[in-house]
Image: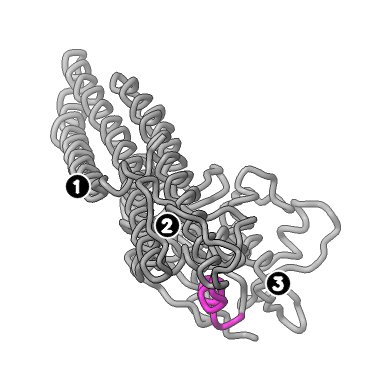
């Protein structure tokens, strides 16, 4: 267990520096993998077709796979270290708030971070409340630092045993797991749901402006349902225009990522995004004469209960078609935002850029929901077909591009203008 004295003497910045080093190594490994494929395996396969050439090309492919696997594993370590850095840094901010409260209310602290004396029955109400807040904040800081330490230790020890993995698919699964560990650490940085709202307010106020912003982007669902978080903060996370609830959109995606959609299309990725928007309160735009069967519609009507028939007759083209949905949202008030400005409730679209026999250049063919953005800007998304929850866009994109060709990632923020 991490003690309070351990916490206040820690150096969160060292974890950030280590995470950056591992990220640099991961980038180096990925660049090397791409170079080996393009400069080694591909030319051999194209120009040396006999048995010897095939064997040589195969060796290059194995080396490229090892380097690609290294990228995923190195990035996994970086994610865990980023989580540790954030947990320690916010715990240190809580410790500063504890010190400020103790001084303001004349409550000297012991080495364990709690006041040396409990205010007597005759103490004023402010001092008694400050005492309760100090004790609760101290427990929060120690708990989150301890959980982060335990998760980091366990995950780094586990990842140390994966260094022999040379199968990119297996390495990518390890990366997905590390992404969840990072998210678990961030979730532990937030007070539990039954915490005294006054303590929650004190916790929130202990965070600096950047930490508050980071927490709003990383864990909007937990914050939005926590008593004590300022209402203006909740409104900002949900969407200040009141057109649909971005928190409910994220919540739906996180809760239904591995569940069957209410209706099944041949490809359900965009259907899943529409279901999340529908759950979040986005109103339908239907044609007064033809319902959803129009060129400028989004939504659906009740069908007959047959997915094959309903998907063709009772759902708009923009409901389950990635390019149709993207274009519809941009036509009707939506804005495309750079990755650096992404926030939960935005939509990720994959636009084909590289050669692909099955996908036309410029075609938007995939959609997913942004469900979290990490303090370092890493985007986590959730999708159907294939189904993933809170996985890294940065981490998974190289595997997608290896399989399908270069992609242009477009991030769209809906602002419906039809109601």
Residue at x 56% of width, y 83% of height: 241
The residue that disc 3 covers is 293
Magenta segment boundaries in residue numbering: 229-242
- Measure the C-alpha gap from mark 2 to mark 3: 25 Å
Q: Secondary structure at mark 2?
A: strand
Mark 2 sits on what residue? 350
407 on left or right of 323: left
Quadrant, the C terminus: bottom right
Residue 35: image location, x then y, percent = 16, 37
Where residue 339 appears, as percent x and y from the top left, is 34, 64
Count the labels in the image: 3
Pick the front one: 161 or 270:
161
Q: Is 338 above or below relative to 376?
A: below
Q: Is residue 365 left or right of residue 160?
A: right
Which one is nearer the viewer's eye here, 372 or 208? 208
* Color theme of the render: one colour
Instruction: Name the quadrant containing residue 349.
Output: bottom left
Going from the N terminus, do you reach mark 2 or mark 3 first?
A: 3
Q: Quadrant of residue 98?
A: bottom left
Q: Secondary structure at mark 3?
A: loop
The mark lying in front, picked from 2 and 1, is: 1
Q: Nearer the viewer, mark 2 or mark 3?
A: 2
- Separation of disc 2 and disc 1 at Cα? 32 Å
Residue at 35% across, 61% down? 99
| Element type where label 1 sits in the image | helix
Q: Which one is closest to the eye, mark 3 or mark 1?
A: 1
Q: Residues within 10 Å of mark 1 (few under 14, many from 20)?
A: some
Residue 82 shows in the view:
yes
> Which residue matches tag 1?
17
Determine the residue located farthest toward the top in the rendered image: 51
| Near-viewer residue (16 or 276) | 16
């Amino acid at each position: 267990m991490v003690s309070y004295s351990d916490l206040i003497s820690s150096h969160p910045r060292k974890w950030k520096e280590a995470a950056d080093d591992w990220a640099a190594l991961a980038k180096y490994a990925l660049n090397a993998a791409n170079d080996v494929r393009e400069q080694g395996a591909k030319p051999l396969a194209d120009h040396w077709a006999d048995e010897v050439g095939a064997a040589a090309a195969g060796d290059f492919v194995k080396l490229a796979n090892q380097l690609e696997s290294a990228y995923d594993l190195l990035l996994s370590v970086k994610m865990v270290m980023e989580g540790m850095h954030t947990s320690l840094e916010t715990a240190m901010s809580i410790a500063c708030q504890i010190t400020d409260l103790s001084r303001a209310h004349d409550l000297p602290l012991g080495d364990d971070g709690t006041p040396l004396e409990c205010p007597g029955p005759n103490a004023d109400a402010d001092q008694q409340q400050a005492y309760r807040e100090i004790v609760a904040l101290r427990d929060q800081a120690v708990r989150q630092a301890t959980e982060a330490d335990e998760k980091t230790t366990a995950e780094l020890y586990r990842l140390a045993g994966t260094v022999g993995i040379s199968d990119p698919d297996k390495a990518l699964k390890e990366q997905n797991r590390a992404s969840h560990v990072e998210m678990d650490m961030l979730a532990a940085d937030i007070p539990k749901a039954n915490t005294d709202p006054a303590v929650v307010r004190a916790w929130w106020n202990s965070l600096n402006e950047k930490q508050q912003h980071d927490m709003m982007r990383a864990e909007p669902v937990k914050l939005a349902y926590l008593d004590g978080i300022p209402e203006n903060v909740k409104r900002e996370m949900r969407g200040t225009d009141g057109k649909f609830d971005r928190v409910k959109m994220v919540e739906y995606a996180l809760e239904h990522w591995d569940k069957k959609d209410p209706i099944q299309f041949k490809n359900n990725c965009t259907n899943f995004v529409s279901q999340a928007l529908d759950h979040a309160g986005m109103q339908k735009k239907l044609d007064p004469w033809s319902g959803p069967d129009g060129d400028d519609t989004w939504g659906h009507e009740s069908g007959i209960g047959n997915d094959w028939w309903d998907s063709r007759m009772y759902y708009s083209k923009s409901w389950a078609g990635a390019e149709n949905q993207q274009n519809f949202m941009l036509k009707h008030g939506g804005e495309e935002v750079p990755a650096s400005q992404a926030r939960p409730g935005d939509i990720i679209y994959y636009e084909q850029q590289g050669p692909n026999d099955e996908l036309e250049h410029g075609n938007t063919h995939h959609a997913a929901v942004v469900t979290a953005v990490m303090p370092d800007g890493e985007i986590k998304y959730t999708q159907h077909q294939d189904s993933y929850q809170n996985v890294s866009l940065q981490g998974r994109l190289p595997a997608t591009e290896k399989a399908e060709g270069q992609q242009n990632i477009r991030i769209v923020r809906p602002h419906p203008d039809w109601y």
